[in-house]
């Protein structure tokens, strides 16, 4: 069992439990469900497998996961929930990364309107205690790209554990709590008022374009699977909103 498999299993089981028959498969483009390459040296070859999972549910346009498994020193689970554009829900964003240098964990409900006090009241205040509890065992991870800051909430968990047990225990506990809290938001949120829709669409596109453009995994995917596969994976699956809205190609 690899490091993030229990996270993925938990997320899918929780989604099924929460939405029951309303959880629907979301298409993963052909050829992207599973991709494998051999890296490493001749003496010590290492297979790197990337698998993709996607669902949709009421109010949630795309729930998707990319799971990279390349041995003990390369494990990634990137799990994001993109809400429909007629709700003001934040994005659920988890970037769980294990590289030879250690673990890098980003977990948040990424806001549409970072600096709006009423938005913070609605989506940050309810998880503030949860955030504080988990942050005690998961201290701030330091250096963080300045330009990414607008896309994270005050309850952003950003940490670089050195011990794998911290990921297995504390990060997993935080992941479960954040997902639970997110699904509660999704269950209870009401349709956004008509006049808010343009702002939601603008904020979703801004987030999406930023993530597609700056995807920190781009270099890794290019090395393993080539540029063509990587760009199609990013724009056709990982961050597909522009395609779906017909704004691209
Ligand atoms: N990150 C993704 C996707 C990944 C992925 C789709 C499927 O958005 C993996 C894979 N993240 C990934 C990898 C690394 C990081 C790092 C492989 C390591 C890159 C490397 O060191 O070579 C949060 N992820 C990071 C970093 C941050 C994040 C801040 C450190 C790299 C850096 O300093 O730029 N998550 C990331 C982020 C946003 C987010 C920037 C912005 C909204 O949601």
Image (cartoon, rainbow, N blue to C red):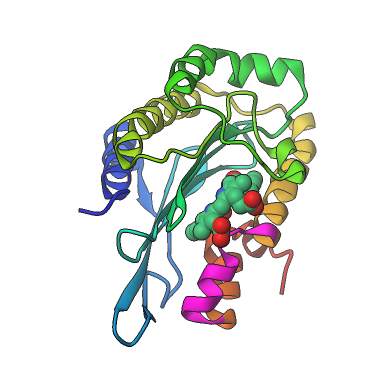
Left or right: residue 172 versus residue 130 is: left
Residue 245 makes an appearance in the image? no
- Residues 11 and 73: in front is 73
Residue 6's spot in the image, x, y percent?
Answer: 26, 44
- Residues 249 and 49: in front is 49
Q: Residue at position x 77%, y 22% from top?
A: 116
Magenta-span inclusion, residue 224: yes
Q: In the picture, which quadrant includes the C terminus?
A: bottom right
Q: Residue at position x 31%, y 75% from top?
A: 47
Q: Is residue 230 above or below residue 102?
A: below
Across the whole image, how many numbered discs are drawn on residues? 0
Span colored in magenta: 214-226
In which quarter of the view is residue 32 placed?
bottom left
Residue at the extreme left of the image, as rendered? 1
Magenta stretch: helix, strand or loop mostly: helix
Left or right: residue 123 versus residue 178 is: right
Residue 57's spot in the image, x, y percent?
Answer: 43, 42
- Residues 39 and 32: in front is 39
Magenta-span inclusion, residue 102: no
Residue 138 makes an appearance in the image? yes
- Residues 197 and 212: in front is 212
Q: Residue at position x 69%, y 21% from top?
A: 119
Q: In this view, does 202 lie above or below 237?
A: above
Residue 199's spot in the image, x, y percent?
Answer: 79, 37
Residue 44's spot in the image, x, y percent?
Answer: 29, 79
């Amino acid at each position: 069992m690899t490091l993030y498999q229990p996270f993925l299993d938990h997320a899918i089981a929780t989604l099924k439990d929460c939405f029951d028959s309303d959880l629907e498969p979301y298409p993963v483009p052909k050829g992207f469900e599973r991709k494998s390459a051999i890296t490493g040296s001749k003496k010590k070859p290492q297979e790197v497998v990337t698998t993709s999972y996607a669902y949709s549910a009421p109010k949630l346009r795309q729930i998707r996961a990319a799971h990279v498994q390349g041995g003990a020193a390369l494990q990634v689970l990137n799990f994001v929930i993109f809400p429909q554009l007629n709700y003001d829900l934040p994005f659920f964003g988890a970037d769980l990364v294990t590289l030879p240098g250690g673990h890098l964990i980003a977990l948040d409900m990424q806001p549409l309107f970072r600096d709006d006090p009423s938005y913070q009241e609605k989506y940050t205040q309810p998880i503030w205690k949860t955030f504080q509890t988990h942050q005690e065992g998961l201290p701030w991870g330091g250096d963080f790209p300045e330009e990414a800051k607008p896309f994270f909430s005050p309850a952003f968990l950003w940490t670089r554990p050195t011990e794998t047990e911290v990921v297995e225990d504390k990060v997993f506990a935080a992941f479960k709590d954040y997902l639970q809290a997110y699904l509660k938001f999704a269950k209870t949120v009401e349709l956004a008022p008509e006049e808010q829709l343009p702002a939601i669409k603008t904020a979703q596109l801004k987030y999406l374009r930023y993530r597609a453009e700056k995807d920190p995994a781009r270099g890794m995917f290019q090395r393993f699977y080539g540029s063509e596969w990587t760009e199609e994976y990013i724009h056709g699956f990982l961050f597909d909103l522009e395609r779906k809205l017909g704004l691209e190609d």
